[in-house]
Image: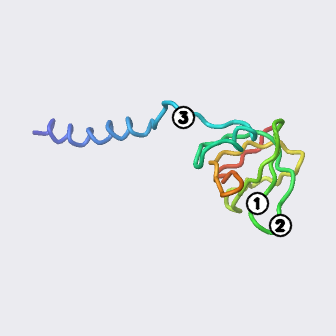
């Protein structure tokens, strides 16, 4: 009887572990350059390394640059790192592509400073 309850308790743990792995097939790879992000589909995962070069207006939008070009990125205040950084600080941005009618930008979820 106890073994049956034990099996019922463990079954959901193993099933959610398999689901947590996520999709790894075609199209699941993250975009890693600005040039690729400019051509990517909406909601494509992005991991970029480069420099936030300037703030655009008084919005949460910034210009980001790597060795393939520049793109607008949106970084909410709560997603900024606790350590101040400037245009000479190399950063790693993790987020997804937002496709608009005439442009694309990256909605950033995580900002990491690279030493």
Q: What residue is drawn where x is 71% and y is 56%?
A: 102
Residue 93, given in percent of the width and then of the height, sits at 71, 45
Task: Name the residue rendered at 59%, 44% in the picture.
Answer: 44
From the viewer's perspective, tell me whether residue 40 is left or right of residue 3: right
How many neighbours does mark 3 have within 10 angstroms: few (below 14), some (14-19), or many (20 or more)?
A: few
Residue 84 picture location, percent across and down? 82, 54
- Quarter of the image for the N terminus: give it: top left
Q: How many marks?
A: 3
Locate the C terminus by quadrant: top right
**Kind of element beneath mark 2:** loop
Whether residues under marks 3 and 1 lie with C-beta atoms below 8 angstroms apart, the answer is no
Label 2 vs label 3, nearer the camera: 3
**In the depicted structure, whether residue 19 falls above or below residue 59:** above
98 and 3: which is toward the camera: 98
Q: Residue at x 32, y 38 (%)?
A: 15
Residue linked to disc 1: 61
Quarter of image, res 56: bottom right
Dot 2 and dot 1 residues touching (CB under 8 Å): yes
Direction bottom: furthest residue: 58
Q: Which of marks 1 and 3 precedes in the sequence?
A: 3
Structural crowding at the residue carrying mark 2, measured as other residues with C-alpha within 10 Å and reported as few (<14), some (14–19) or many (≥20): few
Residue 57 is marked as: 2
| 5 to the left or right of 79 | left
The residue tagged 3 is: 27
């Amino acid at each position: 009887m106890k073994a049956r309850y034990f099996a019922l308790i463990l079954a959901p743990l193993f099933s959610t572990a398999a689901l947590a792995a996520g999709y790894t097939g075609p199209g699941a790879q993250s975009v890693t350059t600005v040039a690729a992000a400019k051509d990517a589909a909406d909601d494509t995962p992005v991991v970029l390394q480069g420099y936030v070069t300037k703030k655009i207006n008084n919005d949460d939008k910034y210009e980001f640059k790597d060795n393939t070009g520049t793109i607008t990125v949106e970084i909410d205040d709560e997603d900024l790192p606790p350590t101040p950084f400037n245009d000479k600080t190399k950063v790693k941005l993790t987020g997804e592509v937002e496709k608009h009618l005439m442009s694309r930008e990256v909605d950033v979820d995580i900002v990491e400073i690279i030493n």
